[in-house]
Image (spheres, rainbow, N blue to C red):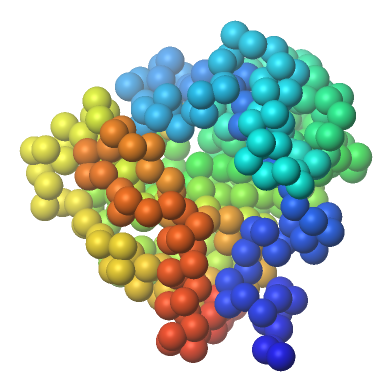
Amino acid sequence: MGMNYTWGSERRLNTYSDYFKREFGGRVQKITLDAGFTCPNRDGTSGTGGCTFCNNKAFNPSYNDPEKSIESQILQGMKFHKTRYRKATRFLAYFQAYSNTYSSLEHMQSLYEQALKVPGIIGIVVGTRPDCVDEDKLNYFQELSLKHYVTVEYGIESVINRTLQRVNRGHDVEKSLWAVRETARRGIRVGGHMIIGLPGEDRQDFLDSGRELSRWPLNNIKFHQLQIIRHTAMAREFEERPREFVSFTLEEYLELMMEIVEQLNPSIVVERIAGEVTPGMGIRDGWGIRYDRVLQAFEDLLEKHDTWQGKKFKLEE
Ligand code: SF4
């Protein structure tokens, strides 16, 4: 019999799957949607040209088509996941593509409510930019979260302003912290997305970023290694100045992630430690192994070093 960590599991990481088991008593599957939202960093509202790393098309599953209704995207997604995992019976509608709060409140409401009406959907996860929420939208999420499971997931990407400027992110770190706090303050679950390996950042920056995020009121976090997608501004930058980009073998990345996770607040659920690479999309193609194997290798590494999430976490520094 092993010991249980503070998150109530024997796993050395506060994982997303354990979290769902605690919260819902079993497996919950996310269904990715493209609700036809756009992005203010592409249309001139926050910026033009978008984030230099972005090619949003690279991340959409094939069953997503913004021309199709929310309901039919969900039904198709359910079919897809039921073939893969026969036991999936409960689902979250994941509004993933672009910035899913970038519209009028009425429009957002109608889309989320369409999703919540589909039998089997127990809640929504809404991916967006920190500068695409305001008091009214957050108050609406607060109300919705009294009846449904709601997570708002922000693209934080970096906690260093010079990096955000360099990748043309169109908002600063202060905006991210504001959005995370305002969301958490209303009792809405809040997630963050971080990229490890943006140009100009080094190993120390990655470690400091993990420590910094540990002080934010985040429920979940996703870490992704930087993927340099073809036909993006970043792909051109990488071709011109490859030395400004840290590149990791899988072993190096997992060792770095181990150090980040050791310092990470144990109450934050780690949704991912790395991103899935769509084959053929990237310039530096991935490690060639599936995410479940990456996670397994990571947990083996934690065991080998007898370490765990939050082992070196200190609240006040
Ligand atoms: S990463 Fe998100 S915010 Fe940045 S340009 Fe792409 S869709 Fe817009």
Q: Is residue 70 left or right of residue 64?
A: right
Q: How many marks?
A: 0
**Residue 30 location, quadrant:** top right
Seen at 25% across and 62% down, the residue is: 249
Which x, y percent locates residue 132? 58, 30
- Seen from the viewer's position, the closer of residues 198 and 91 is 91
Considering only vertical position in the picture, is 287 above or below 268?
Answer: above
Residue placed furthest toward the right: 147
Q: Is residue 260 left or right of residue 240?
A: right
Considering only vertical position in the picture, is 16 above or below 309?
Answer: above
Seen at 64% across and 31% down, the residue is: 80
Which x, y percent locates residue 255? 35, 73
Which x, y percent locates residue 13? 58, 72
Q: Quadrant of the N terminus?
A: bottom right
Seen at 75% across and 52% down, the residue is: 27
Which x, y percent locates residue 294? 43, 61
Quarter of the render that holds ligand 1? top left
Considering only vertical position in the picture, is 168 above or below 72?
Answer: below
- Seen from the viewer's position, the closer of residues 266 and 104 is 266
- Confirm whether residue 245 shows in the render: yes
Q: Is residue 260 left or right of residue 112?
A: left
- Seen from the viewer's position, the closer of residues 162 and 283 is 283
Residue placed furthest toward the top: 67
- Seen from the viewer's position, the closer of residues 72 and 258 is 72
- Confirm whether residue 174 shows in the render: no
Seen at 24% across and 49% down, the residue is: 199
**Residue 257 location, quadrant:** bottom left
